[in-house]
Amino acid sequence: MDKLGTVTNVTAGNSSMDRSAIIERGSTQHLDPGDLKVLVPVLLGVLCVLGLAFNLTAMGILFSNARKSKLSLINSLVLNLMLADGLLLAFAVPFRAAAYSHTSWTLGWPVCKTADWFLHACMAAKSFTVAVMAKACFRYVANPNKQVSVRLASVLVVLFFTWLAACSAPVPHWLFASLQREGQGLACVQVVPPEARDFMSVYVKAYPLGVYCAPLSFALLYFWKAYGRCQRRSSKTQNLRTQIRSRKLTLMLFCLTVAMATLWLPQWVVWVWERHAAQRASEGGEPSVASPPLLLALSAQLLAFSLSLVNPVIVLSLSDEFREGYRGLWRRLTLRKHPPPKPGPHAPTAPQSPCPRPETSGQRRGDRNLEPSPSCNQGHRGEAPPEADRGSVGEGEGEGESPRDGIVLPDVEQFWNERETGSLTDENDPIPWEHQEGKEPRK
């Protein structure tokens, strides 16, 4: 916002200008040497650094969540709000602090021409974004299952028209800004020619209504309706969870709107007051309405800039999704991934089943010696089994069979070998009744 005041001491070079033109000092009114000349730039610098840190953190979390899940219109609008705050802090606040720290304008004509216009464009974009966000929140609360995701083209169209309206509304700030020589240096002022006087008298009244009053009133109305829908209890557990999530989302966006309306109100009061005083001064020579005090104007401007710091703080503190994303981002930035510990005497390893010892007492000399199963060899030696031994297991697992289907137990193999060759003895015969069928006891 701009800090305006009527220029009373115009130099001789400007004395030929039509006295009916309204000459207003721009938003970069120079401060007298003293504590304010140092304190105000320092406060603006602190707001700039903290605000950029919080806004970049919130934008990083939004980008990370957008890659993991589907695109959401509300998240896109929150990202646009953080983007507008970041642009304002990066390109408007530093020039404002530099202008306050000098006794004359030293930033050149292009910055003077675009400083107020860019500042108002960013703030209007935030106001329009909140209004669209309120409508999207109400639609989500009315039918949460339907508003899961939107197409990227739709989001880009909404953002394009939002910024188009925001950049068009403050065009007079760019049109009437100019450099005027005052005293020993230059001053960035708003010079309204006589032919545009009627237009500016209407613009001064319509601009606050269209950029501040109407969008925020619209947003508060829809947030109130959305919160009323969230208060209705649902019997189903799934709907109840969705209702709780919708209530938290509505509360977060409602707090953003209330903070914007509260922190902007003093600046808009000063804005209207100063322009009304400038118009009365151009009509009657002496202003019948005094300009607002300097401390009031500076305090209102600092409150308006602090909104860019308050918005990401509200989002990061009231949203569960943003809190989890912030914790994950903090862990990725501060913690290092340690390599997995090597198995040792104190490190637990995977449990292994005991392997039975092969029985070789009843085998023939020509039989091959039985070896433990490949899984046991792998577990004891720590080496991979050979391809011939593990081929059947891999195929069995690929066909959905158990890995034990291809393993033959040693005692079962010994039993069938001895039975087929007829080398069973009476002592080791497991089925003696089969051999005693033809032998009947003698009487």
Image (tube, grey):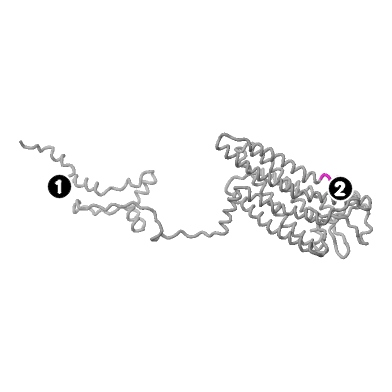
Q: Is residue 388 visible?
A: no
Q: What residue sits right under mark 1 in the picture?
A: 427
- Mark 2 = which residue? 200
Q: Position of residue 43 (x, y in %)?
A: 73, 60
**How far across and down, in percent of the image, does residue 195 sit?**
90, 49
Inspect the magenta stretch and tell me whether residue 203 lies in it: yes
Q: Is residue 41 magenta?
A: no
Residue at position x 37%, y 53% in the image: 351
Whichever of callouts 1 and 2 sits on the residue coming sooner in the sequence is 2
How far from the left and from the top, in percent, is residue 125? 73, 48
Q: Is residue 350 above or below residue 440?
A: below
Task: Give SS at disc 1.
Answer: loop
Q: Secondary structure at mark 2?
A: helix
Using the rendered view, name the quadrant where residue 109 is placed: bottom right
Give coordinates of residue 181: x percent, y percent: 88, 61
Q: Nearer the viewer, residue 182 or 376?
A: 182
Q: Amino acid at mark 1?
A: Glu
The span picked out in magenta is 196-206
